[in-house]
Image (cartoon, rainbow, N blue to C red):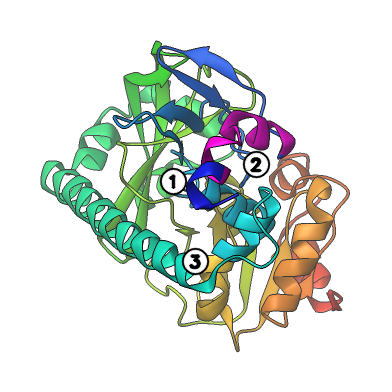
Amino acid sequence: MDINSTLLNNDLVEIAEKAGATFRKAGHELRSACPLHHGGNRDAFAVYTDEHGKQKWRCFSGPCGGGDIYDFVQAWQNTDFVGAYQYLGGETNPDPGEIARAAEIREQRARVAKEEKEREHNRALQDLQTARLWEAYHHNLNERTRELWRGRGVIDSYQDYWCLGYNPEFVINWEGGRHCTPTLTIPIQSTPGEVINIRHRLLNPPTPNDKYRPDRPGLQSAPFIAYTQLGFETDPILVVEGEIKSMITFQTIYRDGVTTQVIGIPGKTQFRSLVDRLQGHDCYICFDPDADEQALEAARAVKGKIITLPMKIDDAILAGALDRRSLQLRMKSARKV
Ligand SMILES: [Zn+2]
């Protein structure tokens, strides 16, 4: 089979299902949780037919990107174009000239798509920073809505420190339609004062595991840095799963003169983008009990230590099973990998 008939003889839906997708129809496309990054958003991954009648896919909530069946197999099987071609039943020894030409065309297309994505991201970012929406959400905090944050363990002074907020009506796309919910809002800063995203914690999520959305499409997810002023310029650094866990942990461990940073990654697989910045730091990984494997991988990548708890770190703190002192002891006795 040559490159185009390989494309024709394979069904992207079937391949994605093999990778773990379970599709539902949503308008003209099929939607599923993303089989590549495994997030909780059941609508994150779309398969659709483009204007040339070709099957395409796109991940809307993780770092996976999109493309055709070759791109999917490359991402899923962690292989190159020739590997994907062979996986899909192409010849074992394809004509090198044809492969090189096809690879060149695909590279060009990928470059254009990447540039377009960057433009989209820059537009969204500029909109966000011009509108300074996080401030409007923060002004929505009153006695009642502060209570929602307190209920999650975040005390008032920290609600102000992180400029947390509330949005009474946030609309998301859901199964081809719209779903409206109040949200708790979390500005994500890259450096002090530089907000690059707002995460919305859906208070009435469409399904129990689908609880977060960015303020608008095109904005990239990024880690939550609890000790805003210090960024990555400090030690030790404790890495947990998610913004709220990072808040609760930081609130517990912080005292004047203590410079422990607590970073919340937006999903347990979204650690890789952090590796460079964590290299050489005194790093502690404390993921949820269901993520031992990811914690091990993360700790190895940064030569860090692992803290294992029988429950989620914020639950442990809020239940009174973990306080500042015992957390410090845990860090001291954390095991190297
Ligand atoms: Zn994805």
Write down the region rendered in magenta. Answer: 6-18
Amino acid bearing label 3: Ile
Q: Nearer the viewer, mark 1 or mark 2?
A: 1
Element class at badge 2: loop
Residue 220 lies, with reference to residue 137, above or below; the image says below
Residue 79 lies, with reference to residue 302, above or below; the image says above
The residue at label 2 has a CB less than 8 Å from ligand 1: yes
Q: Name the residue beneath numbered marker 3.
A: 99
Residue that appears at 88% across and 49% down:
310
Amino acid bearing label 1: Gly
Element class at badge 3: helix
Helix, strand or loop for the magenta stretch, by majority: helix
Label 1 or label 3, whichever comes before in sequence order: 1
Residue that appears at 53% across and 36% down:
8
Label 3 or label 2, whichever comes before in sequence order: 2
74 relative position to 136: left or right: right
Q: Is residue 113 visible?
A: yes
Which label is found at residue 67?
1
Q: Name the residue beneath numbered marker 2.
A: 38
